Amino acid sequence: FEKINKIIKEVENNSYFRKEIAILINKSRRNYEVDLPLNFGRRIVWYVLIRVYKPNLVVETGTEKGIGSLIILEALKKNKKGKLITIDIDPYSGSFLEHLKTVNLVRKNGDSLKILKEIKKIDFFIHDSNHSIIHEKKEFELISNRLTKGAIVLSDNSHCSNALFNWSKKNEMDFIFIKEEPENHFYNGGGIGIAIKKSNRREF
């Protein structure tokens, strides 16, 4: 608990990272869509998992504005290794990433089901694109033979979809669900599903 809590505080209390995010958002054409200082919410779980497992390649479907991508990139930066490929069908996605200078980021525009076929090995996969259950299932099926031995698969849609749960059981993986519970907010929060090989559990 102490080690995980330390990682959470690492990102929450990183004033330099928050300042960097604020600059990128303020330069963006979509800066009016978020309030600053930015609340990371359930994306902190993404950060913790990447810091613990230290993947070489993270693949994210659903870039949207790019908040999740920024969190991922900060975790990779702290790890001093790894690359992010982020995919979105919207050509105007990733507005918060437009002024970001890093060699660890590859942005791809197009249908995730087509682009995923181009990627051979995935260490850490995040589904956050089209949240129809049919599309989500197709993404998981498509990456099944592209995952490395210790890969982690995450869904940002598991509060209203059982796609990852069913896929994890089919592939003999443990399934963990983490519910987001915002305090004093109109939004009830989403939920993260995590599929992980039993042999890949980390002991601290």
Image (spheres, helix red, strand yellow):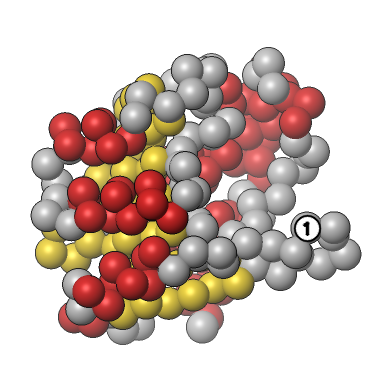
Horizontally, is 198 left or right of 161 in the view? Answer: left
Q: Report the residue at 43% width, 77% height from top.
A: 176
The residue closer to the viewer here, 12 or 67, is: 67
Q: Residue 153, position in %: x, y?
A: 32, 61
* Vertical side of 137 occupied by 112: above or below: above
Residue position for label 1: 187
Q: Residue 138, position in %: x, y?
A: 29, 50
* Vertical side of 183 occupied by 66: above or below: above
Q: Residue 4, position in %: x, y?
A: 49, 73
In this orientation, does residue 2 appear? yes
At label 1, the amino acid type is Tyr
Q: Report the residue at 29% width, 63% height from top.
A: 152
Horizontally, is 128 left or right of 136 in the view? Answer: right
Determine whether the residue tagged by mark 1 lies in a helix, strand or loop. Answer: loop
Horizontally, is 150 left or right of 138 in the view? Answer: left
Dot 1 crowding, Cα within 10 Å, few <14, some 14–19, many 20+: few
In this orientation, does residue 55 appear? no
